Amino acid sequence: MIFDYKLKKEEYFQSIRLYTRNYDREGKRKIIVNYLSGIFLLLVSLYMILSLYIQLNNFKKTLPDYMVRILINQLFTKHFAYLAMIVLCFVLGIVIIYNGYIYPSRGKIEKSIDLNIFEPRQVEINDKGIFSWSLNNETEKNSYFWKDIEDVFETNEFYLMKISKKKIFVLPKRMLSTKIQSDFIEKHVTK
């Protein structure tokens, strides 16, 4: 089957994000590391706050009120290091968790874009593999044989074909009829 192929920029970003978050081992690992380190920093800041609270309660039990006020005053006016560490751990924890949530970021994806992928193309899918060529430049041809394609993943909107560790071929479902999709799933989709 031969069909017209025009990948939209938004589809590209969405598919790369889906692939990296759900099917790429390195992407999953980075996300988990971000979440765990962010949670660790949040727990450290919580521990520091709780230890400060417990220490203050102990001071209130053993020391007179005026001494407790002097200690609190020194801690929060002269010695900002402890308070700064609490705030820094809390803010860094939130930033790191957010980075894990948005990974990979749009900016990171844009740095690695090959603008040729957004040009109109013709794509042929047959029993040998996937072949595509640019409508603007007939000499620019790409061939991906089924034996070289490591995995084919199906999502709600795309078929994602893993060509190599850092390269995938994105096939939006909107470009294929339901009959062609069912044949494609039967023959080639692995996950």
Image (tube, rainbow, N blue to C red):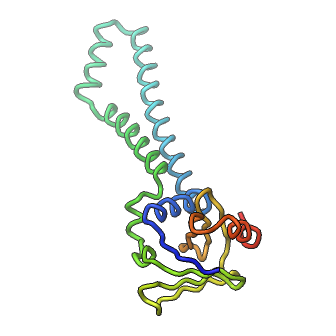
Above/below status of 18 relative to 114: above
* Residue depicted at 68% across the width and 64% down the height: 178
Give the residue at x 42% y 41%.
94
Name, please, the residue furthest toward the bottom: 139
Indicate the position of residue 64 as horizontal and vertical percent values.
34, 6
Q: Quadrant of residue 108?
A: bottom left
Q: Going 47% across and 89% down the picture, which residue do you hit?
A: 140
Location of residue 43 with respect to 146 vertically, above or below: above
Q: Nearer the viewer, residue 30 or 56?
A: 30
Quadrant showing the N terminus: bottom right
Residue lying furthest top in this view?
64
Q: Residue 177's image quarter? A: bottom right
> x, y (%) of residue 97?
47, 45
54 to 185, vertically: above or below:
above
Percent from the top left, x then y, of residue 25? Answer: 61, 62
User: Is 186 situated left or right of 130 in this image?
Assistant: right
Task: Identify which residue, 14 or 105, lies in the foreground.
Answer: 14
- How many labels, in total? 0
40 lies above or below 124: above
Q: Nearer the viewer, residue 97 or 157?
A: 157
Q: Does residue 155 appear to the left or right of 30 in the view shown?
A: right
Q: Residue at 55% across / 83% down in the picture? A: 132
Residue 122 or residue 66, whichever sits in front: 122
View extreme (left): residue = 78
**Percent position (x, y) of residue 42?**
46, 37
In the rendered image, the quadrant that contains the C terminus is bottom right
